[in-house]
Image: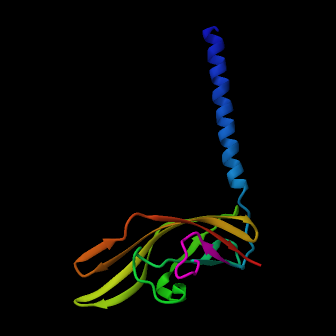
Amino acid sequence: MSNHTHSVLRSRLTVLGAVAGLSLALAAVALAVAPKAGAKYTGFTSAPTANGFKAPVSFTVAHSGGNVLSFTYGDTGCPGGTLPAGNPYLQSADNVKVGAIHLTKAGVFSVKNVKRTTSTIAVQGGEQVNYTISTVKGKFTTKKIATGTITFTNGFTVPGFSHVCGDPITQTFKATTK
C-alpha cells in the first residue's frame, strides 16, 4: 500500500471515528425529555434499606420548567451510625435538602458539591454540626420519569475537630409523577 493510500485511509478512519463519537453524544442528549412543568416527582434511591425502608427522593419541576425545585433525598448519615427505630426518613435530619437545580430545555439537570447542614447537636464545649456534600446528575427519560445519580459525602464538625465519613457514595435514583 502506498503512503498516499495509507494516508487517505487513515484520514477516512479519523473522520468516521469523529462522526461516530458525535452521533453517540447526540443520542445521549436526545434520550432526555422535557418534564411535566409544575409536577411533583417522588421515588427512591438505590441505597440499602434502613430498618426495611427505602431511601426516598423527591422534587418538583418549576411551573416555568426552568428548575428542579426542592430536590431532597434520604440519607442516614455516616455509615455505621445508630438508626432510630422505625422509618428513619420521617426525621428531617435523614433527608438531605439539595434545593433548586437548573433544568435544561432538554430535560437534563445537575449540580455539584452542594453542602447542607443536616442537623446540629449540643455537645460539651459547643455543638456538633452534621453535614452532607452532594452532587446530583439527572435527566427526564419521559415526561413522567426522571433518573440519575447522587454522589455524596457525610461529615461532621465539633469545636476543634472535623471528620469526613469515608469515601463518597454514589447511588442511582428514579422518580415518577402521575
Q: Nearer the viewer, residue 117 or 47?
A: 47
What quarter of the picture does the N terminus occupy? top right
Q: Is residue 49 magenta?
A: yes
Rendered view: 21 above or below 30:
above
- The overriding secondary structure of the stretch rendered in magenta is loop
Q: Is residue 169 left or right of residue 33?
A: left
Residue 177 is left or right of residue 118, and the answer is right
Is residue 109 in sight in this rendering?
no
Query: Measuring 58% from the left and 71% from the top, which residue is drawn there?
Result: 101
In the displayed structure, 8 sits above or below 57; it is above
Give above or below for 59 relative to 19. Answer: below
Within the image, what quadrant is residue 173 found in?
bottom right
Q: Which residues are magenta?
A: 42-54
Q: What residue lies at 70% left-to-right and 43% top-to-bottom?
A: 23
Residue at 23% across, 90% down = 124
Which residue ends up furthest to the top in the rendered image? 2
- Quadrant of the snapshot with the C terminus: bottom right
**Residue at point 70%, 72% (across, down):** 65
Whole-percent x, y for residue 11 in the image: 64, 23
Is 121 left, or right, of 97 in this rendering? left
